[in-house]
Image (tube, rainbow, N blue to C red):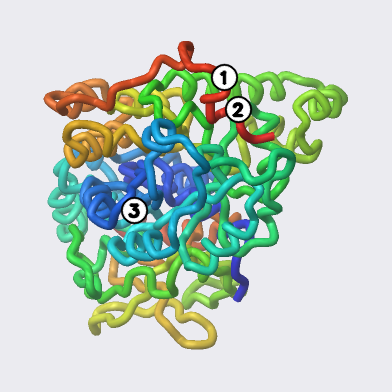
Amino acid sequence: MELGTWRVKTGMAQMLKGGVIMDVVTPEQARIAEDAGAVAVMALERVPADIRAQGGVARMSDPELVTAIKNSVSIPVMAKCRIGHFVEAQVLEALGIDYIDESEVLTPADEEHHIAKDVFTIPFVCGARDLGEALRRLGEGAAMIRTKGEAGTGNVVEAVRHIRTVNGAIRRLQNMRPEELMAEAKELGAPYSLVVEVAERGALPVVNFSAGGIATPADAALMMQLGCDGNFVGSGIFKSEDPAVRAAAIVKATTHYQDAQIVADVSRGLGEPMSGLDVRSMPDEELLAVRGW
Amino acid sequence: MNVGVLALQGDVREHARALGDLGVQASEVRLPKDLEDLQGLIIPGGESTTIGKLMVIFDMLEPIRQRIMAEEMAVWGTCAGMILLSKNVVGHTQPLLRVMNSTIQRNAFGSQVASFEADVPIAGIEGGPFPAVFIRAPLVEAVGPEVEVLARLPGDGSIVAIQEDLMLATAFHPEIVDDRRLHRHFLTVCARVDS
């Protein structure tokens, strides 16, 4: 009997495919998410929109809150640690949750290094804006990738940019001759073996969800049609007028992303979505997606 | 042979790839009309509460149940699928197909840090133990007399694979390994359905 194998870690992410993972800050919100059909919840003290508004250093959540959320639902529970903060990761593993998000939404603890994730039993998901970043995280042992988007904005534009960037780079690799892959690995700053693997498969070797700015059922279906395996929805649900209804609608649109009639039906009468931010008007120091190296 | 994979949520592609390796082009089943002409349906791994709720919302629960009960279609549930096929789940109320006479303990080993791989001998499957991957896996706590136990976990003897006539259920995920023996077994079950 073997624990924490690569198959067990990546397999867990495969079971989440076609689903929606929702940010929650209380056990009550976690139950609303579960009732709406979420495949997992992300236990947080503050959703990204509030982290953005309140400023200060954003850290791992209080273990008491994480445990209370874990005890309130039967679906998997994820939690975030700071980039490079391997002790926060050790703490989250000790809490017995299901997945750790080494996340740029929290204030980074290390501005050069990410966590060596392969030594943990618990699997990690990490954000990426491009293929090189995704493959560096896989090289460190991440078992799932999410394209970053720009969290807490309710604006899907960065999520779209990041999935197009990753998938465009994969298509480029597929068209290369074998001897070109080493130079490309150097260019991407990515492990050569992973570059070769992606060129052969025409896909990342792990599940890739979208994140950061998804606020409507149509946003969710857009990300699925662009090739994501599922959606993280953060502020978009519990910062909207009617979270339970919106959450259920986003779940349905993620399943039936190819059926415009169903996406239309579930989009009716949802109330106000979260108010969005124009990413172009934001100063660089407020952008979260640029964190991660 | 027409075999579909329930594609509401979960690792649909992995099952479709496994069937493809055996020369069967699987269809994705999302709405009741997709069930027509199917001799077999796989309910994949995923989140059982999510798949169950989506089956209710999109009116899939009764049509699937009726086709199974009428023996018009073989069915195989892996992990979440095993839960959804069962009559009872310990400690949870959630939508279920309630077609197999089994009682399931969800998430029987604990959280993801307790997920594991093990080699499990399976009755009727030749060629040595099967490489079984258990991910937040359920266990079969009890079965009725009409249910055949195909596999027990070495060590504690927990039931991890069962068959009841045209219905098959495994607590683990044959779709995420390269061993196709259980998919081949399911296709032989599908072949028993009168088309």
**Nearer to us in this view, B127 or B56:** B56
Q: Secondary structure at mark 1?
A: helix
Amino acid type of the residue that numbered disc 2 sits on in the rendered structure = Val
User: Spatial distance from mark 3 to mark 1, Cα to Cα?
Assistant: 46 Å
Q: Secondary structure at mark 2?
A: loop
Residue at 44% in and 65% down: B136
Asked if the residue at tag 2 contacts the one at tag 3, i.e. Cβ–Cβ closer than 8 Å, the answer is no
Residue A290's disc is 2
Q: Chain of mark 1?
A: A
Residue A284's disc is 1
Residue A249's disc is none
Is B115 left or right of A172, judged from the image as shown?
A: left
Q: Secondary structure at mark 3?
A: strand
Q: Could you tell me residue A44's position as x and y percent?
A: 40, 49
Q: Which residue in the structure is indicated by mark 3?
A: B43
Residue at 28% in and 69% down: B165
Q: Chain of mark 2?
A: A
| Residue ranking furthest to the top | A281
Is A122 left or right of B135, judged from the image as shown?
A: right
Q: Could you tell me residue A158's position as x and y percent?
A: 49, 21
Residue at 37% in and 28% down: A214
Q: Chain of mark 3?
A: B
**Nearer to us in this view, B99 or A141:** A141
Amino acid type of the residue that numbered disc 3 sits on in the rendered structure = Ile
**Nearer to us in this view, B159 or B46:** B46
Q: Is residue A228 above or below residue A137?
A: above
Q: Which callout, 2 or 1, points at the residue further toward the start of the chain?
A: 1
Is A193 left or right of B146, judged from the image as shown?
A: right
Asked if the residue at tag 1 contacts the one at tag 2, i.e. Cβ–Cβ closer than 8 Å, the answer is yes
The part of the image, by quadrant, that contains residue B145 is: bottom left
Query: Can marks 3 and 2 be said to lie on one chain?
Result: no
Q: Could you tell me residue A155's position as x and y percent?
A: 39, 21
